Image: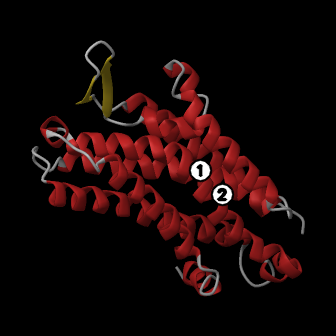
Amino acid sequence: MNMLRLEFYKARRKHYWLIVAAMSGMQALWLIWAFRRIDARDLVQGYLESLYQFTMLNSIVLPVMTAVLVSRLCDIEHKGSALKVLFTMQPSGTLFDAKFLCAGIHLAAAVGFQIAVILLMGHVKGFGSPTPTADFVLYFGSQLLCSLFLALFLQILALRHVNQFIPLAAGLITGFLGLMAMFFPAWVMRLVPSAYYGLLSTVHMDWDRAAGIVTYYRAPFPVADCALLTAALVILYWFGRKSFVKREV
């Protein structure tokens, strides 16, 4: 916890929260625009449509936001060869953990803000269905899990390479692949980390081309896909932390 507090102290003038606020605000504006004209049918399924909209946006926006956030968190250690000094003052493993937790707190706030925006939109527009508390809980957990995996992957790159363009480029590519993978079968989506934003969603869409009607519906939570991503997160954490601890600086 002391190391985590130290990370927030080092970040006091880095404006990390501004990055989260700007990207999250952009998503909120998209939702407002999407509901600028809404009929009775849309009001009934307003909560489900909002969750689906944010899920699609997350596959593009959150990888980019995570890349910017993580690269800035780790860039400070590369300046002036600070790792050499830090490793004499604290265990390298705690530095790795503190940065990961710091990024995770920012990402949890971003996902929590999305839920708050949906609730506010439902109150203002008067969504017809009751507030789907279970859907929100599953949404928060699944979207945060995907974001944590990406944050860990990008942190390993950011701590390994002095040039922070590498994790930034990886975030941009991952966001692009996350969007494109959703047009392919599920087995293809499982190969792309950012596609798990959609894979773990409990809200799906059915489009009737002839009638021009979009219907949103609930689907069972994909426990197998969640377990697969969780196992990948644990393995990646073990590998990334171990390689960082053994790193020569």
**Which amino acid, by three-letter code, is at mark 1?**
Pro
Percent position (x, y) of residue 186?
A: 49, 21
Classify the position of the C terminus by image quarter: bottom right
In front: 151, or 6?
Answer: 151
Q: Is residue 174 above or below residue 92?
A: above
Q: Residues within 10 Å of mark 2 (few under 14, many from 20)?
A: many
Q: Residue at x 58, y 38 (%)?
A: 193
Indicate which disc residue 67 carries.
2
Residue at image point 59% right, 64% down: 100
Q: CA distance from mark 1 to mark 2?
A: 6 Å
Q: Is residue 139 left or right of residue 3?
A: left
Residue 24 in view, yes or no: yes
Label 1: which secondary element = helix
- Location of residue 215 by image quarter: top left
- Residue 241 visible, this orientation: no
Residue pointed to by mark 1: 63
Instruction: Give the side of residue 53 with respect to residue 167, left or right.
Output: left
Q: At 52% across and 51% down in the image, what residue appears? A: 147
Residue 235, image quadrant: top right
Q: How is the protein colored in the picture?
A: secondary structure
When the figure is inspected, residue 168 is found, relative to residue 226, above or below; the finding is: below
Q: Nearer the viewer, residue 6 or 127?
A: 127
Q: Determine contact: label 1, label 2, CB under 8 Å.
A: yes
**Secondary structure of the residue carrying numbered label 2:** helix
Disc 1: CA contacts within 10 A as few (<14), some (14-19) or many (>=20): many
With 96 as the anchor, is 112 left or right in this view? left
Q: Residue furthest top?
A: 210
